[in-house]
Image: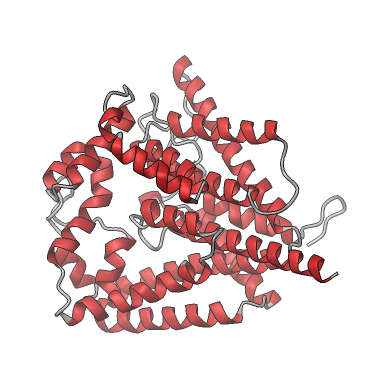
Amino acid sequence: MRSQSFVLNSRHFLVFILVSYAVVVSPFVGAGLRNYMVLLAAMIGGTLFMALRFYLKRQVFWALLLFSIMTIQSLFQGGTGQFGSVALTFVYAMGYFAIAGLLDIIEDKRAFLMKVMRGIVFAFAILSVVQLLTSLVGLPIPNQIASKGIWSYNSLANEPSQLGRIVGISMLCYLVLSRLPGEPEPSRLRLKVLIAFVLTMLLSGSSLAAVAIIMVYVLSRFSLWSVLLVTIIVLMWPMFSLIDFEPLQRAILLANNMATLDIDKVMVADHSGGLRVAPMLIYFNDFTLAKAGFWFGYGTEGLIYFFQGNISGIGEDDIFAGFLPAFAVVYGGLVFVFFIWIFALRQANRATLPLIAFWAIFMTSSAWNTQVFWYGLITIYVTWAASRSDFRSLSVRAES
C-alpha cells in the first residue's frame, strides 16, 4: 500500500489496531454503545494475521481449541444468540493475535510500547481538559457519549468507569515497561505522564477511577513494599472516609457494604459499581459444585436462572453480568479456567503479574466480547512480549 509521500508498514498497522482497542470516537459508536472502529481494526488485523502468517502457532492452537469448544456448546445449549456472541468474541481475538504477530516484528518493543502507552494517556488527558473547558463555557462537549458532563468526563471512552480501566491499565503498562532494563526516559517526561494520568482519572468523576489510581501505584511497585503499603491502607481505611472527594466516598461505601453480601445495600452504596459486583455476589451465593452445570456450563439459560430479575435497578427482562461470573455460568468452570490460562496466566511472569491483577480486579466485570476486556488482555500480552525480548537481548549481550 504505497503513495508518493507515505508508506504503510507494520508499525502503522500495529499502532492503529492497538489504539483502536483503547479509544472510542463517537461517530463510530452504534446501538448499544458498540464501537465499530475497533471491530474494523480487529478484522483488518485478522486479515493481516492470515496473510502474513505470523508465528504464534502454540497460542493460536489453544485459542482455536477454546473457540471450537465454545462454538459446540453454543450450538447445543444456546442457539443462534450464543453463537453470535462467540463470533463477536472471535473477532476481538483476531485483533489480539494481529497485535501479537505485528509486535513480534518490532525490535525495540519496550521503547515502542512505552511511546504508544504514553500517547494514549496524553490523548485521554487532552480531551478530558477540552471537555472540561467546553462544559464550563457552555459549548457542546466533544465526544460526550455516556457521561454526566459536569466534572464527569468520558474523554476517549464510552463512559467514565471505562476511562478508569483503560487509562489505568495503560499507565500501569507504561510504568512496568519503564522498569524493564533499557534506556530510561527523562524524569520530566515521566512527570508529565503522571500528571496527565491523575488529571484524567480525577476529571472522570468515577469511583472506579479513584480506586484505580491507588491500585496502579501499588501494583506498579510490585514487591514487599507493595504488600506493606496495602497493609497500611487496610489499617487506615476508616481515615479515608474523612477525605471530601465524592467518587472516593462512593468507592469506600461500596467496599464497606460488599462485606455484608447484601445486594440491595451494595446497589444503594454505589449503583454503577454495584452493577459490576452484584452478579458475582449472586453467583457465589447460589452455585454448587455438585451440579454438572458448574463444570460444563448452563448455557444462556443459566444467565436467566441466576441473574434475571435479581438485581435492583435492572429491568425484569434484562441480564447484566460480565466475564466473571457470566462466562463461567454459560460455558462452565473448566472452559472458564482454560480461557484465563490461554490469555492471561500463560503469559504470567514478574512483569505481567501487576497487569494480570489489574485486569482481574477491574476488567473481568466487563463482558468477554467488549473492547475494554480485550484491551486488558492485549496489555498483558505486549508487556510479556517486551519482557521476553528484553531477556533475550540480555542473554545475547552476556554471550558476546
> Looking at the image, which is closer to me, 364 or 175?
175
Q: Residue at x 39, y 35 (%)?
A: 210
Q: Residue 157, can we see it? A: no
Residue 52: image location, x then y, percent: 70, 75
Residue 28: image location, x then y, percent: 50, 48
| Figure quadrant of the C terminus | bottom right
Q: Is residue 121 above or below residue 398?
A: above
Seen as rendered, the residue at the extreme top is 137
Q: Residue 130, can we see it? A: yes
Q: Residue at x 64, y 72 (%)?
A: 49
| Figure quadrant of the N terminus | bottom right
Q: Residue at x 67, y 63 (%)?
A: 103
> Looking at the image, which is closer to me, 85 or 214?
214
Give the quarter of the image for residue 15.
Answer: bottom right
> Looking at the image, which is closer to me, 83 or 69?
69
Residue 356: image location, x then y, percent: 46, 59
Q: Is residue 95 above or below residue 365?
A: below
